[in-house]
């Protein structure tokens, strides 16, 4: 097993492995970069096939958080944690208390939040052992999903404006993949804005609700890629932009909340060559991290949501620069994120020299 030479390592500042025999906790916390502030990222609980897979996942995800926060303009670094285990069968209060103790050992360098496989109540249990938990209901911003949906809505608007030259969403057809916390919230916002919805989710009750309440057209989970729509909004799984799906897509825009949408980096180029505008996942889905960055004694939801709406302008500037430089939108998002990091690093070095 390699760590330092792993492709995903990318100069991580810290990687910590925790084991608590009594509760059975096996967790890894990765801190990628704290240039902009404490490393914030969700806690994923997943039944990894092996430890290599868990290490690769936590490294990839924590690096992604550095880029997401940098691009979103928030003063948070990039980190992530994983708990190795089955989220359906292995959860106990003792496990999350032990996880809280693990987070506490970092003294605030890493701040945990919910992610795939963990819930706000799980993190509330972890909170008994550490104060370094964000996005839970106790006196702070709560579930980040509504903010994420709000950000995706504004990023999608920007993409439609740029690609379809439309300043509103009336009659714009959006194919939404996944009607979970973010996907359903996005559908409600789209419906209110006059868009037409096509939806797919294996969870029948969610589909029925969207059909009944939002007038959506339901299609099968495979058929969602083949729709004659303007926009494809992936709000479920990662790696869904691949050779097969891109060949099938008939849309002009891809704009959705899912993390790590591109199966491989080259798929950004494939989308560009097909004339499909791709709103980079970590640019458009940053609403959650933005609202969390507002947490504190003076938390004001309205102010935070106003900043989330700024994802419209962030996306628009990515689209414009990508067009100017004739490169993919994914490349430009990375460039902007790295430019900010570099500027802050240089400024810190300058101040250190001056003092
Ligand atoms: P969720 O678990 O609430 O919803 C996911 C939905 O996708 C579920 O309804 C599930 O049934 C559905 N689904 C699963 N497989 C599917 C398939 N093959 N086709 C269609 N639907 C399928 O998750 P969420 O919180 O809504 O997050 C959605 C995505 O957005 C995830 O990729 C997540 O990582 C990402 N994201 C979420 C947030 C947030 O604040 N919740 C922030 C950033 C990114």
Image (tube, rainbow, N blue to C red):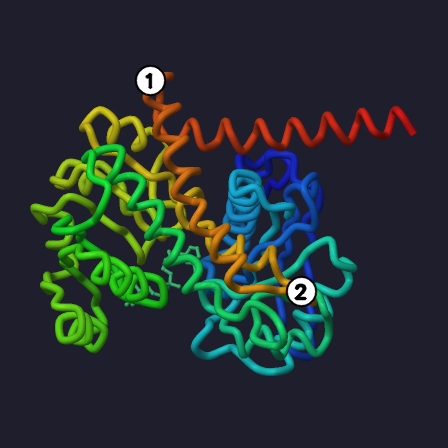
- Residue 337 lies left or right of residue 274; in this view the side is right
Residue on which the image places disc 2: 298
| CA–CA distance in space, label 1 to label 2 | 43 Å
Q: Dividing the image into four equal quarters, which quarter contains ligand 1?
A: bottom left
Residue 297 at what x, y percent from top left?
Answer: 69, 67
Residue at mark 1: C-beta within 8 A of ligand 1 = no
Near mark 2 (Cα within 10 A), the count class, few <14, some 14-19 or many ≥20, is few
Residue at (63% x, 71% y) in the render? 25
Q: Quadrant of the C terminus?
A: top right
Nearer to us: label 1 or label 2: 2
Q: Which sits earlier in the primary sequence, circle 1 or circle 2?
A: 2
Q: Nearer the viewer, residue 187 or 332?
A: 187
Which residue is most to the top? 325
Q: Which mark is residue 326?
A: 1
Instruction: Give the secondary structure at mark 2.
Output: loop
Q: Nearer the viewer, residue 112 or 9?
A: 112
Q: Nearer the viewer, residue 340 or 14?
A: 340
- Residue 126 lies left or right of residue 135; in this view the side is right
Residue 33 at what x, y percent from top left?
Answer: 66, 41
- Residue 354 lies left or right of residue 120; in this view the side is right
Residue at (41% x, 64% y) in the render? 146
Residue 341 at what x, y percent from top left?
Answer: 63, 32
Residue at (65% x, 40% y) in the render? 12
- Residue 146 lies left or right of residue 75; in this view the side is left
- On screen, 275 above or below 97? above
Residue 207 at what x, y percent from top left?
Answer: 18, 71
Near mark 1 (Cα within 10 A), the count class, few <14, some 14-19 or many ≥20, is few
Q: Which mark is residue 352?
A: none
């Amino acid at each position: 097993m390699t760590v330092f030479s792993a492709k995903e390592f990318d100069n991580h500042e810290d990687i910590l492995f925790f084991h608590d025999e009594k509760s059975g906790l096996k967790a890894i916390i990765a801190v990628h970069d704290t240039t902009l502030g404490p490393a914030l990222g969700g806690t994923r609980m997943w039944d990894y096939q092996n430890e290599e897979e868990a290490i690769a996942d936590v490294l990839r995800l924590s690096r992604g958080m550095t880029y997401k926060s940098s691009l979103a303009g928030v003063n948070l670094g990039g980190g992530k944690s994983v708990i190795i285990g089955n989220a359906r069968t292995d959860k106990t209060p003792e496990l999350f208390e032990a996880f809280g103790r693990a987070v506490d050992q970092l003294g605030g360098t890493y701040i945990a939040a919910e992610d795939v496989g963990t819930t706000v109540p799980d993190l509330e249990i972890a909170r008994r052992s550490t104060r370094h938990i964000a996005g839970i209901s106790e006196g702070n911003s709560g579930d980040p999903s509504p903010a994420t949906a709000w950000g995706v809505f504004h990023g999608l608007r920007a993409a439609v404006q740029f690609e379809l030259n439309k300043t509103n969403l009336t009659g714009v057809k959006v194919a939404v993949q996944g009607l979970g916390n973010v996907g359903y919230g996005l559908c409600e916002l789209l419906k209110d804005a006059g868009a037409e919805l096509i939806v797919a989710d294996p969870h029948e009750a969610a589909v029925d609700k969207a059909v009944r309440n939002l007038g959506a057209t339901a299609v099968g989970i495979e058929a969602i890629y083949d729709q004659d729509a303007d926009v494809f909004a992936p709000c479920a799984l990662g790696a869904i932009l691949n050779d097969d799906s891109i060949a099938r897509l008939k849309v002009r825009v891809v704009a959705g909340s899912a993390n790590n949408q591109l199966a491989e980096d080259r798929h950004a180029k494939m989308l560009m060559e097909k004339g499909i505008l791709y709103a980079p996942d970590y640019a458009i889905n940053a609403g959650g991290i933005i609202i969390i960055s507002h947490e504190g004694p003076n938390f004001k939801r309205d102010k935070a949501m106003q900043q989330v709406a700024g994802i419209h302008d962030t996306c628009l500037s990515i689209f414009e620069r990508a067009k100017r430089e004739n490169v993919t939108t994914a490349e430009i998002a990375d460039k902007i994120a790295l430019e900010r990091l570099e500027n802050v690093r240089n400024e810190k070095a300058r101040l250190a020299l001056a003092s």
